[in-house]
Amino acid sequence: MSLEFGSSKQSKPVWREWLESLLVVAIIAILVRSFVVAPFKIPSSSMVPTLEVGDYLFVLRYPYGLRVPFTDLQFFAHPPKRGDVAVFDYPEDRSKDYIKRIIGLPGDLIEYTDNRLSINGEEMPLKQDGRRTYYLASGEPTVSGLFSEQLGDVKHAVLRNPQTIRDGTWTVPEGMYFVLGDNRNNSRDSRFWGFVPQSFLVGHAAIVWWSWDGHAQKVRWERLGHLVE
């Protein structure tokens, strides 16, 4: 006489399968947001004309290294390039994210006088392209001169007026970076609070995926898909 042993496999309850699936999705989302890409909203006019108030960006987190969330531990740290538009922890309040352009690299001598930028004794070429009306975050309109600035290999637009809000000379320490807003007369940046450490870098601004014009109460359709340069 032979005996047959059968095995019965109990299926999981539907609620448990849904819960496990949602948990997996949540873990993947947290990992992607922490190490790959994260959304970021532009709240101020400090980066006009490159970035408008109401732009929503995707920020790539990995170009400058992988940082363990809520710590300064950074693996595979990679320095930014001059001209990068970078998101970083605001040095005076790390609960806030700031976005500016990388101007000075470690060891650079930065001079900003009469709204003219010089790096290591060489003045960065500046060409006027006209004037630009824009709105502050408060909704108040204002006008500035529109210029093209050649920052090494990177050509980008800046706003500036004849007067300057802060002149000075700075030598960038090792492991630090000097940043400026593209709206030079309406940006609180390294001219005021100093340098950004490598470990404070959050990521590189990549693309505008949504843009809302709060003044006109409409979508800026022409900005969707705009690459940040």
Image (cartoon, rainbow, N blue to C red):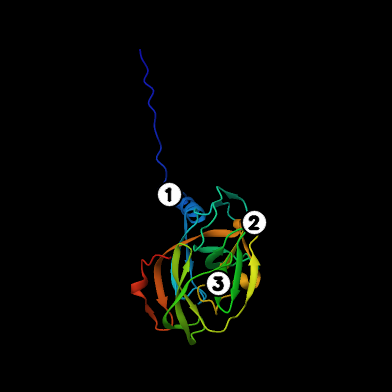
Q: For the N terminus, give its image quadrant.
A: top left
Q: Quadrant of residue 69?
A: bottom right
Image check: 95 left or right of 13? right
Asked whether the viewer can see residue 116, the reply is: yes
Q: Nearer the viewer, mark 2 or mark 1?
A: 2
Q: Secondary structure at mark 2?
A: loop
Q: Is residue 106 above or below residue 17?
A: below
Question: In front: 10, or 187?
Answer: 187
Mark 3 residue element: strand
Looking at the image, tell me whether mark 2 or mark 3 is earlier in sequence order: 3
Q: Quadrant of residue 7?
A: top left
Measuring 60% from the left and 67% from the top, which residue is drawn there? Answer: 110
Disc 2, disc 3: CB below 8 Å?
A: no
Q: Which mark is residue 117?
A: 3
Callout 1 amino acid = Ser
**Residue type at mark 3?**
Leu
Q: Are marks 2 and 1 in contact (CB under 8 Å)?
A: no
Residue marked by disc 2: 174
> Mark 1 = which residue?
21
Whole-number angstrom distance, CA of label 2 to CA of label 3: 21 Å
Measure the alpha-carbon separation of dots 1 and 3: 53 Å
Q: Position of residue 201 (x, y in %)?
A: 57, 59
User: Marks 2 and 3: which is nearer the front?
Assistant: 3
- Specify the amino acid type for callout 2: Glu
Cα distance in 3D space between marks 2 and 1: 46 Å
Confirm or deny contact between disc 1 and disc 3 (CB under 8 A). Answer: no
Q: Residue at x 64, y 70 (%)?
A: 169
Q: Position of residue 25 (x, y in %)?
A: 44, 52
Give the number of the mark in front: 1 or 3: 3
Q: Residue furthest left?
A: 222
